[in-house]
Amino acid sequence: MASDDVRRDFDTLSTVYDETRQPLEPATIEGLRSYLDEHRWTTILEVGVGTGRVARPLVDRGVRVVGVDGSRGMLGRAAAKGLPYLVRGNAYRLPFPDGSFDAALFVHVLHILDRPELGLREGARVGRHGVLAILDLPSWGEGTDRPAEDEPRRIVREALAEAGYPNLLRAGPRAKEQEILRTYPPAEIRVLSDREVSEPLSRRLDALEKRAYRHVLHVPADVLTRAVAAARAKVGTRTVTYRRNEAVAWWSDAPGVPAPPR
């Protein structure tokens, strides 16, 4: 799933992860639970379980969830939430026999993988009914400008490039998720929650300021502080309103995806 460097990065991020990530919408959790009920799937492997912020509410709703993650720090946070079934492992070589679970679940994780197609393949191997992924759908059409809520990220990216740190924060998770959907079309996509969100643009900078993303962990603190301050000055007190759409994608198998080397 990740190199030693990436695992170490997530060990570091585990200390601020929950406070800097938006939780899934309650409607998303309920919608996912209903989706599982509809298919009578009761045993799920969550790949990239992280701090357990999704597994915990699913377990509370009666789903048997086994969580796997490469980061000891993340698994420690999940264990502190009382999750009983946690395993350290790699998304490309899951430590389970074929068909061990009803389905494998990735929640905003596929975009982290260098080879998402291999993660899908391996998830389909251990999931009798395939792979599920929770992801954000874009609220803008093809060929349109990027939404205003991405402006703070763009300003920080440009400031970091000027300071000698180019190519950081270039493609956000949502863009990477959409590329995966285009390249490996799922059998089904179902919207689970859709609501209008209004927030200060400056809120988008809070996680960057806390170094809560892998790609800025190795930027010197003073350089990142100046870049974030420049972005705060430019966005000021402006607010943005946008639609937040969370959906579940289902791959019944992984056709055409090469098997990972053993």
Image: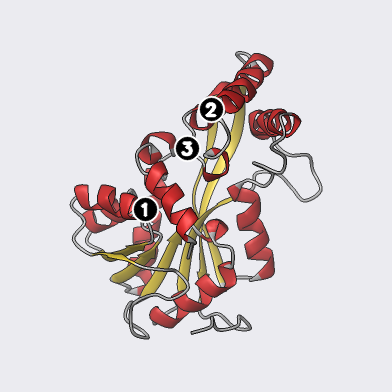
CA distance separating discs 1 and 3? 14 Å
- Which residue lies at the image location 38% right of the left edge and 36% below the top edge? 16
Of marks 3 and 2, the one in the foreground:
2
Label 2 secondary element: helix
Which residue was labeled with disc 3? 212
**Disc 1 target residue:** 50
Q: How many marks?
A: 3
In this picture, residue 48 sits left or right of residue 115? left
Residue 81 seen in the current view: no
Above or below 84: residue 225 = above
Distance from the alpha carbon under mark 1 to that under mark 2: 25 Å
Q: In front: 3, or 195?
A: 3
- Colour scheme of the picture: secondary structure
Q: CA distance from mark 3 to mark 2?
A: 12 Å
Q: Quadrant of residue 159?
A: top right
User: Label 2: how many residues lie within 10 Å, few (<14), some (14-19) or many (20+)?
Assistant: some
Q: Amino acid at mark 1?
A: Gly
Q: Which residue is mark 2?
A: 221
Quarter of the image where one finds residue 158: top right
Secondary structure category for the residue under label 1 = loop
Residue occupying the far right of the picture: 143
Q: Identify residue type, mark 2.
A: Ala
Query: In the rendered structure, which amino acid carries the disc numbered 3?
Result: Ala
Q: Relative to 140, does residue 133 appear above or below in the rendering?
A: below
Question: In x, y percent, where is residue 45?
Answer: 34, 69
